[in-house]
Image (cartoon, rainbow, N blue to C red):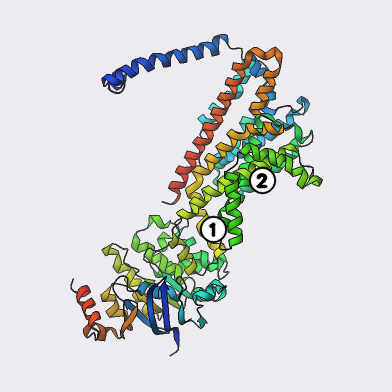
Amino acid sequence: MKAIVEMKSMNKFYGTHHVLKDIDLAVTRGEVMVILGASGSGKSTLIRCVNGLEMYQHGSLVVDGFDMPVEADRKLGGERELAQIRKGVGMVFQQFGLFPHKTVLDNITIAPMRVRKKTRVEAEATAMKLLDRVGLTAHAHKYPGQLSGGQQQRVAIARSLAMEPHLMLFDEPTSALDPEMVGEVLDVMRELASSGMTMMVVTHEMGFAREVADRVVYIDQGSILEIGKPEEFFDNPKNERARSFLARVLKH
Amino acid sequence: MIATSIKWTRHNLFGKPFDVVLSLLVIPGLLWLVYSITDWAFASAKWDIVVQSLRVLMIGVFPADQAWRAWTASAIIGAILGAGFGCVFCFKPHHGLVLLLVPALLLIVDGGLTNALPATGIIASTILGWALTSYAPLSRKVLPAAAFTGFIVVVAVMAPPGVGLWGGLLLSVLLTLVTSVLSLPIGILLAFGRQSRLSSLRIISAWYIEVMRSVPLILVVYWIWILMPVLAPQWGLADVARGMIGFTIFYSVYVAEYVRSGLQAVPRAQIEAARSLGMSEFDINRSIVLPQALRVVVAPLVGNVLDIFNSAPLVFIIGLTDFLRAGQMILANPQYGDRTFEVLSFLLVTYFVIGSMITYAARKLEDHMATGTR
């Protein structure tokens, strides 16, 4: 199967700090990849590179058939490739990132109308279908501030899906939620995974990783230490640091 | 009622020894001040001068037989302002009654219709505009277009006798409106320019803002007044237009600074979310960043309008007759030499009323913005 994301010895620096070290990673279409690691290990940075929110300095990154320009080229105007990539890649953030001055419906329709040039009628029809999918049709005309965290995150997922992405990135989608709301968001993500969506998920939800992931990636200090099937990784981690990480997170 | 007010007084004014001393000093002084002012205002002041010169105060040296043009323009402006106010503050019948007190008072004091009739017209159209946007929210959608058209009509109606004749309170209001409306888009562009990725644009905006913030308004107005005919002699711009340009050039810088603080208040996550949806930088700035930024700075921006209104008298430097200058003109007449206090008191009270109305509107607008989404 052909890869939708392919990183070859990708390196990223913040100034002199080496954040990502020689990352080689390929995500195939339809795959659910969960990225694990301690905070500060570089896992969020890794998926933020995939839609160009972060820039990398060396190596190569191909997303959905487009070459992501390196930092030096971005400064010379790699904007067109970037826009092409972003159209096909959805992203869900820890803090939801909904637009507080727009209703739920407008949050979902704005990008399809502006970027994909859909009419309002078309965009709203799609939006209502997506809201139905995440179970929030009744809230279409509310403002994000009137919804709970879990509801907001489901709207954010619907908003990304409205752009009909080929790949969805999740950057700790449940970390900012109250415990009782984590489930409703994970349910939506589970449904999305079973519908065949390609997903890259950074999360601390080990249960979700074990159950839904096709492959698990373990990152520590900017390097990939392990890639494998979730059962292999959780039951029999080969790397010493992965073992101690699992011991810490699975203890409670 | 009386018992609680005695309790309140004892607690707040005579609670501690220091309070007692302070109250004993301040309260009689205050009473004396209020007494002397009222005594003067009702016993010795001769207000007839204000009534007689009301036309000059309101529209300056605009020819008397053409005054209907100025009154029509004022009515249109009143309707626009009323309609704008109605968008955030719902009209109630008793507001209308309070406003109608103005023409009623004029009728009683003047004993004729010369002043009361135009005043009734202006107040009535203000009330109409206010009530329209309060009771028919759909009309708010066409307000910008209607206001723009109304403004063109104002200029068209006022122009024939000569733009140089514009004056009085009407000129102050027109100057404030034009400056506020024009400086907003220019200020927004400057604010974006200042944080642009193009360094030429950034440097030009930053310099423009720095220079304008470092010089006095009166100098800018005078300088533009002298410079415009040199730069564009073929335009033959009137003094009023040159004054408005000077004010706009000066105040757009302050708008830019307010807007910039608003832009910085928009969380970076908002921009990232919009980028991840594939939106262009232009769309992100227009639809995501700017609306949220403006929401934060509505109050300072309205404060800026107040600032413009209170600075309007500075146009005397280029020979225009604004509200304050009109008052001075009346006093320049030797026959009215002993009425200085009456005229200046009227100016003071009018400025105070209009200024506090703007402040009040700002507060209402802020509340309105706050309840909108959060």
The extreme left residue here reads: A251
Q: Quadrant of residue B70 in the image?
A: top right
Relative side of A88 to A183, left or right:
right
Residue depicted at x 59% and y 57%: B203
Few, some or many residues within 10 Å of mark 2 (<14, 14–19, 20+): few
Is disc 2 in contact with disc 1, using a CB cutoff of under 8 Å? no
> Measuring 67% from the left and 18% from the top, which residue is drawn there?
B331
Q: Is residue B76 above or below residue A248?
A: above
Numbered badge on residue B352: none
The residue to which callout 1 is attached is: B195
Q: Are marks 2 and 1 on the same chain?
A: yes
Q: Foreground: B193 or B259?
A: B193
Question: Which image quarter holds the C terminus of chain A?
Answer: bottom left
Residue at the outermost bottom position = A1
Which chain hosts label 2? Answer: B
Could you tell me the amino acid type at mark 2? Phe
**A181 relative position to A70: left or right:** left
Outermost residue toward the top?
Answer: B43
The quadrant where residue B55 appears:
top right
- Under mark 1, the amino acid is Gln
Q: CA distance from mark 2 to mark 1?
A: 30 Å
Element under disc 1: loop
Q: Position of residue B36 (x, y in %)?
A: 49, 12
SS class, disc 2: helix
Q: Image quadrant for the N terminus of chain A? A: bottom left
Q: Which chain hosts label 1?
A: B
Residue A169 x/y as whole percent: 41, 74
Q: Which mark is residue B148?
A: 2
The one of B235 and A163 positioned closer to us in this rendering: B235
Where residue A30 appears, x then y in whole percent? 41, 83
